[in-house]
Image (cartoon, rainbow, N blue to C red):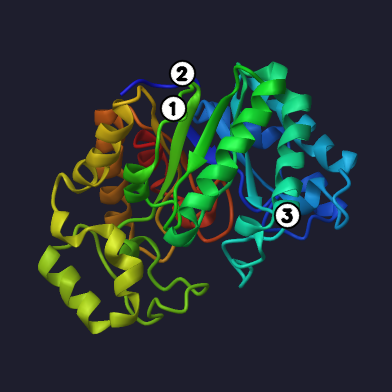
Amino acid sequence: MKKWPGFEKGINLGGWLSQSNLKKEFLDTYITKDDIRQISEWGLDHVRLTVDYTLLQDEKGKMIDSGFEYIDRCLQWCDEYNVNMIIELHRIYGYYFLGGETDGGFFHNEKVVMRFLNIWIALAKRYGSRHERICFELLNAVMDAADQVSWMNIAKSAVSIIRVFAPQTKILVCGSRHSSVHSINTLSDFHDPNVGFSFHCYEPILFCQQQAYWRDDIPMDEKMSFPISKEEYHARLEKNPQIMFSAENTCPDLLGPDYFKNLFERAVNHVEKFDSIIYCVEYGVIDRADNASTIHWFKQIHEAFEHYGIGRALWTYKDLDYGLKDQRFEGIRETILQYL
């Protein structure tokens, strides 16, 4: 599979321009130039800048110039330290993958879709000339497979409009089932060499999101180590049938030393048919996992990424239960950095 140079080993800047209160005092201090310098010194080549529509667009759909200025500021820092940037819409008007906002009419309402497209027009106009530094990611995740056909039509419209102002910018498009790698097998060719397909990887989910307080279907009293046998994993699924559907993407039958290679293989083969790429926009291990298992997980997924040439961005730089900069990773951070 071909690669996108400069977008091979990255990290998310979650919790700053998205999943936050977006108040000026917070925005001015949460991420600074020193953080981009640190990321560069870690040897990473790009950041994924997650952005909520409320930073860029008011409730009437008018653009907020001061919101774009935070992207400008981060871009200046990235230029200084030679770090590339993915600009990604994490939350959009009418749709959000968290907080009960997954059915706001986005997939079937032309006016709501137009608000989404208008943000991408504004971003493309502002940053389209920076195609060597910037990549666009249309949307973080689509939850329901039933929305995939509608989403693909919207995505194709978005790519066409972006191309008017940003003809060479790389663009990432997600599939459904919470951006599962398996949904990529059902996506069609955009006939554009600079369009790739994104996915998330928190697999096996009972390990990577163990005791996750934001999930109603994950037991809060269970710990899990990695690696784990498929027999034990099946037993845990049977014990907690409420997570069977959520966990089906983890392919427990494939558990073993080549787990991630097997997990990614079909998607890689699919996009190679039309000379495209897959890119992992989020992956990581929750801070409740033990150190030895965490290191083993990173080592194994790193081998698969390198085997296929898959670009990726770790979730996340700081806080949000996954932050690489956090105290939890003291003592093992340098080891993990080897496997990013």
What residue sits 35% from the left and 45% below the top? Answer: 186
Query: What residue type is disc 3 on?
Result: Val
* Disc 3 and disc 1 in contact, CB within 8 angstroms: no
- Is residue 173 shown above or below 235? above
- Give the side of residue 81 with respect to residue 210, left or right: right
What residue sits 31% from the left and 66% below the top? Answer: 247
Question: Between marks 1 and 2, how big is the CA–CA gap?
Answer: 6 Å
- Give the side of residue 61 with respect to residue 169, left or right: right
Question: Between marks 2 and 3, how big is the CA–CA gap?
Answer: 35 Å
Where the N terminus falls, by quadrant? top left
Residue 42, image x, y percentages: 50, 31
What residue sits 23% from the left and 83% below the top? Answer: 239
Q: Nearer the viewer, mark 3 or mark 1?
A: 3
Quadrant housing residue 260: top left
Nearest the viewer among 251 and 156 is 156
Query: What residue type is disc 1 on?
Result: Glu
How busy is the neighbourhood of tag 2: few (under 14 within 10 Å), some, or many (20 plus)?
few
Residue 158, image x, y percentages: 63, 36
The mark nearer the N terminus, 2 or 3, is 2
- Give the side of residue 332 with respect to residue 259, left or right: right
State the residue position of label 1. Answer: 8
Q: Tag 2's secondary structure?
A: loop
State the residue position of label 3. Answer: 112
- Is residue 42 shown above or below 332? above
Residue 313, image x, y percentages: 48, 39
How busy is the neighbourhood of tag 3: few (under 14 within 10 Å), some, or many (20 plus)?
some
* Disc 1 and disc 2 in contact, CB within 8 angstroms: yes
State the residue position of label 2. Answer: 5
- Give the side of residue 128 with respect to residue 257, left or right: right
Nearest the viewer among 114 and 137 is 114
Query: What residue type is disc 2 on?
Result: Pro
